[in-house]
Image (tube, rainbow, N blue to C red):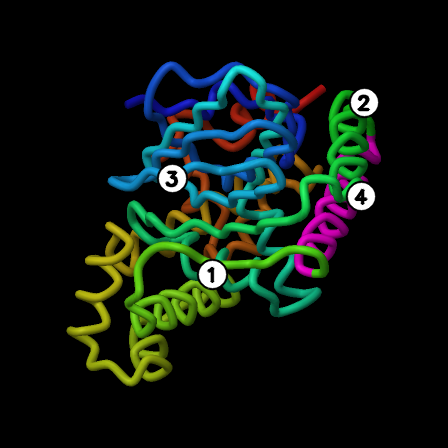
Amino acid sequence: MYSCDILFPAHHQITIIKNPSAAKGRHNHTFFELNCIKTGRCLVELGGHSFFLPAGSFAFLPPDTAHLVHPNQDCIWYQLLIAPDVLEQLLSFDNNIFCEFFLQSVFTKESTDCLISHTASAEPDAWLLLDAMTLECQKADLYSDKMLFHLLLTLFYKLMRIGEMTILGSHDFAKKTHMAVIARYMLQNYTCASLARLADQLNYSLSYCSHFVLENTGFTFKQLQKKIRMQKAVSYLLYADTPVNLIAEQLGYSCSENFMKVFKQEYGLTPTQYRARMKPQ
């Protein structure tokens, strides 16, 4: 198994490839992955499960989970890689099944849940949207990310209108619900998150809340808060021109020196060095 984040260009938070080469083995990455099967079929291995996707299927896979998508020879398909930050923006628009899937899986360790949509393979609108996204992704100009986001949002609503949406995987609905509460709380309060306040929302004791977070995310509460802050920092550095001292303030650090120290420990570079090396030109 290997991590393939390096394969995806940093100039977009949404990347789409038509008929990509099949991966050589099981792999993981920090993106959500949407596989769209126009003709033929694909075999999907996710965690310890495997299933076939026929023509007209859309499969939304969680991040940080080992998986493999293998198309048959006559398959025409599209693969979208979507940064969690993009899906987080959906929360301000709606509370739909894509938001639910995002909240349930964004911090869940090795989630094997999968959001499936089945549509009539002859339905043209979804494929026209995917072709438009493919063309937009190749432009990489100032408007590309906004165009890709709104095309993706249109695709999601189109799938909810014409397709049958199902979340496959774990049937532990209480756990899923509580993971969604944790994700929403942490994303909304990462600058000042408190284990005590989260425990109150879940009606857990402090010790059990701490254990639940660690068991289901693989991180302690503080580590999870730091992970979110660092992800936000990277987004600011790559996709905005916000000065480093203001990034530190917006992330809840008392001074920029503390932020720079934590960032360098995490990435081996100062924020300024990271931006200079990684920011798309």
Residue stretch in magenta = 142-160
Badge 4 marks a residue whose secondary structure is helix
The image quadrant where one finds the N terminus is: top left
Q: Residue flagged by tag 4: what amino acid is it?
A: Asp
Point out the tag, 4 or 2, that comes first from the N-terminus: 4
- Tag in front: 4 or 2: 4
Separation of residues labelled 2 and 1 (CA atoms):
31 Å
Q: Which residue is mark 1?
A: 103
Query: Which picture quadrant has residue 17?
Result: top right
Q: Residue flagged by tag 3: what amino acid is it?
A: Phe
Q: Position of residue 193 (x, y in %)?
A: 40, 68
Horizontally, residue 23 falls left or right of residue 17, namely left
Residue at the image point whose x is 33% and y is 80% from the top: 202
Separation of residues labelled 1 and 3 (CA atoms):
23 Å
The image quadrant where one finds the C terminus is: top right
Q: Residue flagged by tag 1: what amino acid is it?
A: Leu
**Relative to 196, does residue 67 appear above or below in the rendering?**
above
Residue 123 showing in the rendered view: yes
Q: Position of residue 79 (x, y in %)?
A: 58, 30
Point out the tag, 4 or 1, that comes first from the N-terminus: 1
Mark 4 Cα-neighbour bin, 10 Å: few <14, some 14–19, many ≥20: few
Q: Which residue is mark 3?
A: 51
Q: Which residue is mark 2?
A: 139
Membership of 148 in magenta stretch: yes
Q: Residue flagged by tag 2: what amino acid is it?
A: Lys
Q: Which residue is mark 4?
A: 125
Residue 115 is tagged as none
Residue at the image point whose x is 24% and y is 50% from the top: 218
Separation of residues labelled 2 and 3 (CA atoms):
35 Å
- Tag in front: 4 or 1: 4
